[in-house]
Amino acid sequence: MNKFLHAISFYIFKILTFPFKFMPLRWLYVISDLMYFIIYRILKYRVEVVKKNLRNSFPEKSEKELLEIERKFYKHFCDLFVEQFYIMYASPKQAKRLFKIKNIALLDQYYEKGNSVVVAGGHYGNWELYSLLGLYLKHQLLGVYKPLTNKYYEKFVNKARERFGAIAVPMKETARTAIEYARDGKLFFLGLIADQTPARGEIRYWTTFLNQDTPVFLGTEKIARKLNQPVFFCNMRKVKRGFYEIELELLTNTPLQTEPFEITEMHVHALERLINEAPEYWLWSHRRWKHSRIKDHSQNES
């Protein structure tokens, strides 16, 4: 029954969004402006979650400042929705107009030296653009994703993500896939959205992020240390509506020489610095702090 309902909801979604395929980006932004009014002003989608997250993250900011970030976030959030559809159908030429990589030559140097790279990012800017990096990379792009309940939609999204050379890798298969590539001598760019919330039973490490106790996945650090590959952080900045810049920041060349949890702290606080630059471009509607450190009685462990 669930499979039937998933199929029905997916095909309704496909029918309703099919016209997006033929719209230029400027038309899609008109839809985004309308969505902003409906989602934020009328439906007030997750407004209380956003307000709580912002208030706890920036206790030093005034209510006026927080409200301004909130409004800008919802405008950006609606842009993300229409940009996702544009990316799904864009040609390589159209896709390249959405962003540029400021230091792609740095990655090329690692490729020439025979190094794969592990790259941490976050739900900041437009993370769907990571799937377009295959247009520029010499490495094989491995994009890690969290499987969806609706497999029809998951297949649809992954097909779009793989159009420009990326390979979509389910989260639980990340380590195995990276190890297989390394064993076969294939150089890869492993992209990880590292600010997702672990399930309660999977929490192994807590840190302070945006002034709050925060559980963090250790996958980035574990894979980098296992394969002894350099670790980067993906700084993505929104320059203007419809255009982003990506700059790769080297966190460490020598993961085996780092202390336990050091790499994790590096990418967590690299994201924190990015958010502080322009807070409105992070995903504030996500329930990032739904677990309590006290209730979980979790201890940081190797």
Image: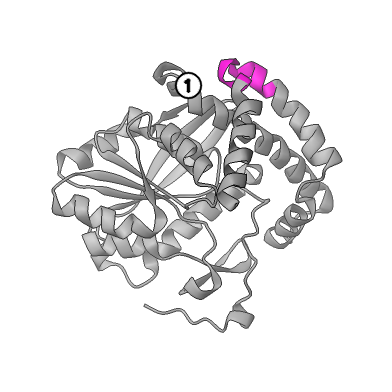
Left or right of 272? Residue 110 is left
**Quadrant where the image shows the C terminus:** bottom left
Q: How many marks?
A: 1
Please check the rendered image and state whether residue 27 is part of the magenta-colored stretch, yes or no. Answer: yes
Residue 199 position within the rendered picture, expressed as x and y whole percent measured from the top left: 53, 68
Mark 1, secondary structure of its residue: loop
Q: Is residue 246 visible?
A: no
Residue found at x 41% / y 16%:
93
Please check the rendered image and state whether residue 129 is part of the magenta-colored stretch, yes or no. Answer: no
Residue of label 1: 90
Left or right of 12? Residue 133 is left
Taking depth in this image into account, of 252 and 20 the one nearest to the observer is 20
- Mark 1: which amino acid? Ala
Left or right of 262? Residue 147 is right
Residue 265 position within the rendered picture, expressed as x and y whole percent measured from the top left: 44, 64
Magenta part, dominant SS: helix
Q: Is residue 33 above or below residue 228?
A: above
Left or right of 68? Residue 294 is left
The quarter holding residue 254 reads: bottom left
Q: Is residue 272 visible?
A: yes
Residue found at x 17% / y 45%:
186
Taking depth in this image into account, of 104 and 187 the one nearest to the observer is 187
Residue found at x 86% / y 39%:
42
Residue 246 position within the rendered picture, expressed as x and y whole percent measured from the top left: 44, 36
The quarter holding residue 76 reads: top right
Residue found at x 48% / y 72%:
202
Residue 84 position within the rendered picture, expressed as x and y whole percent measured from the top left: 55, 32
| Region of the chain picked out in magenta, as a range | 19-29
